[in-house]
Every structure is written in structure tokens, then in C-alpha cells.
Amino acid sequence: MKCGYCGYEFRIEEAEKGCEKCGSFGGCNLVKCPKCEYEQPKIPEWINRLTDWLKKKQIKVKQ
Amino acid sequence: MSALPNSSAPTIVRYPESVESVIQRIEACLRAGDYPFTKRSVAILALYNDTEILESIERQEGSETLAKIRKWVEESNATGVPPSYLVVEARQNTATEIAKETITKTSASRNRVSEYLGRLCTHPFWGFPILLLVLYFGLYQFVGVFGAGTLVGWVEEDIFGKVVNPWVISLFERFNAPQWLNELFVGEYGVWTLGVTYAVALILPIIATFFIAFSILEDSGYLPRLSLLVDRIFKRIGLNGRGVIPIVLGFGCDTMATIVTRILESKRERVIATFLLSLCIPCSAQLAVVAGLLATQKVIVIGPGISIPTLLVIWGLIMTMVFLLSGFLAAKITPGRTAPFYMELPPIRLPSFANVFAKTFARMQWYFLEVFPLFIVASVVIWMGQMPFGWALLLAWIGFAIVKRWGWFGRLLGSGYGFFIGLAISAFSHGYTPFQAAITALRPLVNVLLLPIESAEVFLFGFFRRDYGAAGLDKLVSEHSLTPPQMLVIAVTITLFLPCIAQFLVVRKERGLGMAVGMLAFTLFFATLVGALLARILMTTGWLA
């Protein structure tokens, strides 16, 4: 995943460490960037697959 | 731990004279040789106030030497810019010089337009007109005019108002549902006619356009540049560029943003940011609904396709003034100093459609899953408050909350006791419901703001959730045809008014009950004061009438 604020790329598992410090009531579905702690929502897996497919299609069209 | 020989290698990094002299003085003090690094490195780490190194110095050189070193470091801190910052800056400059000498860039890897645009966004002069353009097109045109005007008009009036709601109401009529069930689902404040309609027909289209605009900004790399641009202003209000993260997130949800204030370095910054979030940062739905309502009022056309929404501009100016002034005063009152801010800037880029789509969808899903159940709960609570037996339920809940520490038996006893007292009140209240009591309690507030009594509902709903109150504002404007000055007064007051229940609970958790209650009392007083003053100024002068 890429942080929307500082642009740092990280794995979800890395970001989950940030949740340990959080005092919220849980289940917020947000991901905290390990570098700058900016929060953004977790992107569902099917959206990731769809965007990957769209990107591949875009590359094919360009070629 | 064995000592490393002191390196006689030439120093590559050239520190400013003020820093270099402190380093050399500290270096000269270090007589013992049992350090894990060279004396120079130890001296630099002492400049950073590194606890481990300072302890090691005290152990080996004695507390007198340590006191001397601390004094030099403090003296160099007093010059304004901390030496740790100057050290990082000098290292960065040296690294840049080395990179320049050793790395060859091919022209293809450089995007001159993006670099130029990136520099322009952080320019002390041109950065602000760019920010205004972003706000005009992103917030006003896209969220206000298109989202809150066109989309809401279509979904709320055409789909829900003409097709869906009449069909649901007819369904209840067809099955001859009892009166209380009708009131619960399709009454004035029913689960369907209020909760579902607010969440789907009003909030969803506005929030969707807001999240699209926000995701575009995020994906373009504009937000870190905004941090740099406002760093100087934020320092005046006791924060720094890093404070942009909780403040920007506050425009999404103030409750979450209050938790994010933990990333700020000092307690002072965390307190100031929490205070500003509670007072004058509207959440996404509130911002979008207010922008949508005010965007269509008193619009001055200044040229083909260019118009100025006067009410929205005045509201924005008042909010900015309150933000800066209250931040400035908070920074003066709260003891401590602002930490320096430096960050690596990612390149500015054209937002990718796939990223914007993914982020908008994820945000909408997150928001909707959180909002929808709460809107339903709020509708049910309001329905209960409108019933004569609402007193029994309300007091049962208060009894439950008061004695919850006594275990299950205590809770049962407390809620049962509250329930029976509530029943007794219901019997003697002659149909006077808790909802009516709350509205009566808010009557002095709306009187002082020179607003119709119906607007008390907006303030009451706003305490459940800010966006719920904002949605009520939309209904109030359409049903009671408020004048433009009244619209401005209510928009300003509701934005500054009490934080919602969830935000209050988080502030209590993060900053303690005393500070949470203090902030609550101050926001109530301040919002009323600003609203009352504005109402009187507008009434006396006749502006915007």
C-alpha cells in the first residue's frame, strides 16, 4: 500500500503495528502509515485486483 | 565494551560555526576513552540530548562535566534554531553535494513540469493562490455545486422524495400498521424517513464528491506540499507542518483526527490540535452540507463562468479567523516551544484513476458502515424521546450508566430504579416528552442567535453526530425558508458548536475528563458568543438581507 501523504510504500502487516498504540474502540478499518502515521482506509482485496487488471489493460493498450 | 580509536579522518560534513564550536568544546571535555563511537560522534549525540550518551558521559566524566555540557547545549538552543536541526540540515546539504558529484541524471527521468508545479505549490507567494484555486474548484464547484446541489437534488428530491419514500409510506398504510410503528419507521423522525433518507439521499452524494476530491489531492502529492506551505503559519499557532495531518484528517472525521494528534511531538502541540479540532474544524459531512447550502446563496457573478458565493466566502473567512486567533491565543497560553519540521517530499504526479477510485470506494465504505447504523440508532433515540414513556427509558439508561461500576446487580438495580422514576415522571408530565424538554432547554440559545425555534433541533441532532445536525440544517432551510443572514449565523454556530458524543469521549480518553469538559464548556460559550455577535451585526447593518 502507498501512503497518501508521504508516498511511502508499505505492507499491511507493517502498518498493523501502528494499531497497537491506538486507543480507539477498534474496527475502524483504517491503515496507519509506519513512516508518518497518516491514516487512510484499507482498500478491499477485490478493488486491488480490479485496479491491477485495469493497469495491465492500460499498459497493453499503450503497447 | 571496548573503545574505538578516535578517528583522524577528515570531517566531511561542515556544520555552522555556532554548532561546530559547541561540538569542539564537548569533544575537549571527553577525557575518558570508553565510548562506543568517536569523541566527535559522542559530542554530536550529546547535542541531540541522547539519553544513553548523556548517562554514559555522567558515568565516565562525572556530573560536573555533564552539567557543563547541558548548559552549552541549552545556550545553543536559545539561539532560536535547535542545533539538532542545524546538524540534520548540514548533513542533508553534504549528501546533496555528494549526490550531485556522483549521480548522473538522464534527462528522461526528470519531469520538469511536475518539478515546477511542485515548487510553485510550496512557494511562499504563489502557493496561496494555488490553495485558493484548489478550494474553489475542489470544494465549491465540485462538492458544493455539483455534489450538494445537482446530485442531492436528483437523489433526494427525484428518487427518494417522489418514488422511494411515498412507496414505503404506502406500504405501511396498506398493512394498517399501528400508530407507534408508523411513527418509528415513517414518521417525521422515522428510521426510514429520517435515518435512511439522511444517510443515503443526502450525506452519501455529498460525501462521495468530497472523497473523490480528497483522493485526487492525496494521490497528486499535494498534501505534503500543503504542510510545507502552512508550516510558518502553523508555527504561530503552536503547531508545525506536521500538524496538517490531524487537521486535514479532521475534515474527514474529527473523532479519528483527535486520536491521530498522538503523532505530534509534544503534549503542548497535542493539546492545541485537539482544541482546534473540537472548536473549528468541521467534519466532512458537515463541511460538505454547509458548503452545499451556502454555495447557492447570494452568488455574485463576476464574469463568464466565474462567480463568488458571498455567504460561503464569509463563512470560510470567519472559520479561518477563529482557527488562527484561537490557535494563536492557545499557543500563548500553553507553555512550551514548537518543534522544528522537516520532511521528504514525494514527487507531484497526475492522479491515477485506479488509485482515486480505490481510495474513494474504501473511504465511502468505511464512512457508510460507520454512519448508517448510527443514523438508525439516532432516529430510534429521537423516536423514544418523543414518546411519553421516553422518560422511563432515558432515566433507566442514566441509572445504568451511573452505577455500572457495581457489577450486574448494581446495573440492574440502577436501571430498574431509573425506569420506575421515569414512569412516574411520564405519568405526571401530561405528555411532555424528553425531546420537548431538550428543545425547551435549547430555546434560550436559539433566541440569543435570533433564529426560529425549529433550529433547536439542528443543535440537538448535532450533538449526536455533527453530520446528523448538518443534515437537519438542510431540512430546516428547505422547510422554514431561512433568510441568508440566518443561514450564515446557523452555519457558523453549528460549525463552532459542541463536538459530537464520539469526539467528546475520545477527547476525554486522550486528554482527560477535566480538559474534555473544559473544551466542551468553552466551545458552547464561544459558539454562542460568535453566533450572537454575528446575528446582531447582520441585523443592525442589514448586510446580506
Image: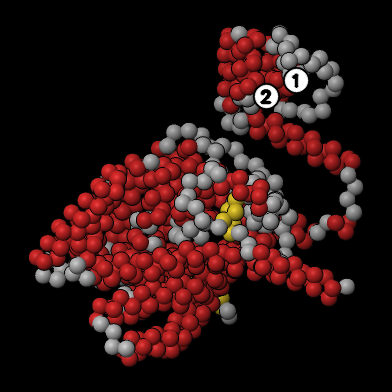
At 42% from the left and 66% from the top, the residue drawn is B373
> Is B289 displayed left or right of B429 in the figure?
right
**Contact between labelled residues 1 and 2, with CB atoms less than 8 Å apart:** yes
Q: In which quarter of the image is residue B486?
A: bottom left
Kind of residue at badge 1: Phe
Is any part of residue B72 visible from this angle?
A: no
For the residues beneath circles 2 and 1, the answer to whether they share a chain is yes
Q: Of residues A18 and B536, which is closer to you in this image? A: A18
Label 2 vs label 1, nearer the camera = 1
Residue B144: give its label.
Answer: none
**Label 2: which secondary element:** helix
Q: Residues within 10 Å of mark 1 (few under 14, many from 20)?
A: some
Picture layout, residue B109 above or below residue B515: below
Q: What residue does disc 2 label?
A: B45
Location of residue B145 in the rendering, given as x and y in whole percent from the top left corner:
51, 76
Residue B37: give its label.
Answer: 1
Q: Of residues A12 and B54, which is closer to you in this image? A: A12
At 73% from the left and 33% from the top, the residue drawn is B90
Picture layout, residue B184 above or below residue B38: below
